[in-house]
Image (tube, rainbow, N blue to C red):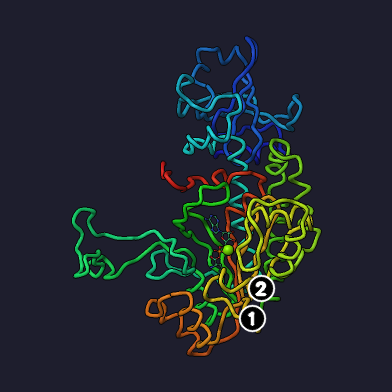
Amino acid sequence: RRSSVEALLTSQELDREVLVKGWVRTRRGNKYVQFIAVNDGSTINNLQVVADAEKFPEETLKDVTTGSCIAVRGKLVASQGKGQATEVQALEIEVLGKADPETYPLQKKGHSLEFLREIAHLRPRTNTFGAVLRLRHALAFGIHQYFNDRGFFYVHTPIITGSDAEGAGQMFRVTTLPDQNPPLNDAGQVDYSEDFFGKATNLTVSGQLEGELAAMALGQVYTFGPTFRAENSNTARHLAEFWMIEPEMAFYDLQDNMDLAEDFLRYLVRYALEKCPADLQFLNDQYDKELLNRLRFVIDNDFQRLTYTEAVDILKTAKQKFEFPVDWGTDLQSEHERYLVEKHFKKPVILTNYPKDIKAFYMKLDEDGRTVRAMDVLFPGIGEIIGGSQREEDLEKLRGRMQEMHVPEDELWWYLDTRRFGAAPHSGFGLGFERLVLFVTGMTNIRDVIPFPRFPKNAEF
Ligand code: 4AD
Ligand code: MG
């Protein structure tokens, strides 16, 4: 049976025969001995395979090139070399899959992240993407662990929906109607009554509304699934397809919601540090020498909480000149968010009680009638990582907000039913998974923390 590289590098049982399979990172050596660095994805570290040139002449090793896949039977021994405790003395080497050095795009030298984006199908074989993908996995696992330990239930919300959960109109249509000559109604528009579902449908922008229904039955729930936004934001923080975690809790007010969000984020950062120390050390050394310090800082320090109105006052008197003006009632730009987090407070910030006109229809109105019980969690280098709120549970107030914001009631009759039957105060939030991975890995472009990024004019692979 094959052992993983991770298991062999940390094994205490030496001088035994082992079998290892993986991809060759490099081969070097001289006419006496060859060193083959093998990686099988289980860890950032490579296993050194030592091949005696007498037993393995160049002729037998010629296909053991960077990128090829090999199986090695050999003896696990203590390593003479620095940087690793063990290595394997080869007894038998089999090439499972060749990789022509003339055409294999990943060579020994480092490649730029931009170049790697163009070969997204191969980039998991690099140290950087191996580390990012293992962290992505660990964080996903940690998210389920966190909620499971606290009595939350994982609910699966639909990906194809007939409504717009955020009311922002940023949806991708799902249709089986033909491109050529689709059926038209009397007004000359596409007639979706002839479509697969008998109505117009879209990819979901958020599982929140269905999550709210589940919370009104199971108490505390969360979703964790793909969400889609057809916003034309060609930035390093936006994807057209991203994963979102949306907890929703009955009987939580905005304070409880903030406490949960803060505890959750700190737990996840701690979880990554505990589960992926080698990957984080690599990313820290390779890209961003402040990464580990920044992660430890988040664990050790409370987030700063203040209202939107207080934040606007701070921004208006800031010495820094902003590209966009700050005025009560307008949405904050990322330069404003980053000023608050990185320059003013120098720690994560939770902003609350935003003007109602710049937030979604479902947020609970404050007593002043001008602001809502919203909260955005802002992180250094990222800006908004979480958006959430206490929900409006009062049927008439909610209907009023929907009318004001032109959200069609007939699409959401089922949502309104939760306010008709056994309504309860409740709250929730959405964490953008890739923004979390971005923060934890210290990468700077969101396209580098998801295997196959979707963004405007790009759906390759
Ligand atoms: O603030 P948003 O739009 O909130 C919602 O969707 C609510 N339904 C959440 C809730 O209360 N249940 O999105 C939530 C988070 C953002 O804070 C951000 O981290 C992430 O989702 N996000 C994106 N991530 C990547 N690319 C995009 N285009 C994103 N849009 C939002
Ligand atoms: Mg938001």
Whether the residue under disc 1 has CB within 8 Å of ligand 1: no
Most extreme residue toward the top is 31
Say above or below: 295 vs 387: above
Q: Which mark is residue 366?
A: 1
Local secondary structure at mark 1: loop
Q: How far, Cα to Cα, is label 2 from label 1?
A: 8 Å
Say above or below: 420 vs 147: below
User: Which one is in front, 444 or 68?
Assistant: 444
Residue that carries the numbered disc 2 in the rendered image: 353
Q: Residues within 10 Å of mark 1 (few under 14, many from 20)?
A: some
- Name the residue located 47 percent from the left edge and 52 percent from the top edge: 232
Whether the residue under disc 2 has CB within 8 Å of ligand 2: no
193 with respect to 458 (left or right): left
Say above or below: 297 vs 95: below
Q: In the image, what residue type sits under mark 1?
A: Asp
Q: In the image, what residue type sits under mark 2?
A: Asn
- Name the residue located 65 percent from the left edge and 27 percent from the top edge: 48
First in sequence, mark 2 or 1: give its number. 2
Q: Position of residue 130 (x, y in %)?
A: 59, 40
Say above or below: 177 vs 65: below
196 with respect to 163 (left or right): left
User: Which one is in front, 126 or 91?
Assistant: 126
Q: Position of residue 193 (x, y in %)?
A: 24, 70
- Name the residue located 48 percent from the left edge and 60 percent from the top edge: 227
Local secondary structure at mark 2: loop
Most extreme residue toward the bottom is 421
User: Which one is in front, 176 or 383?
Assistant: 383
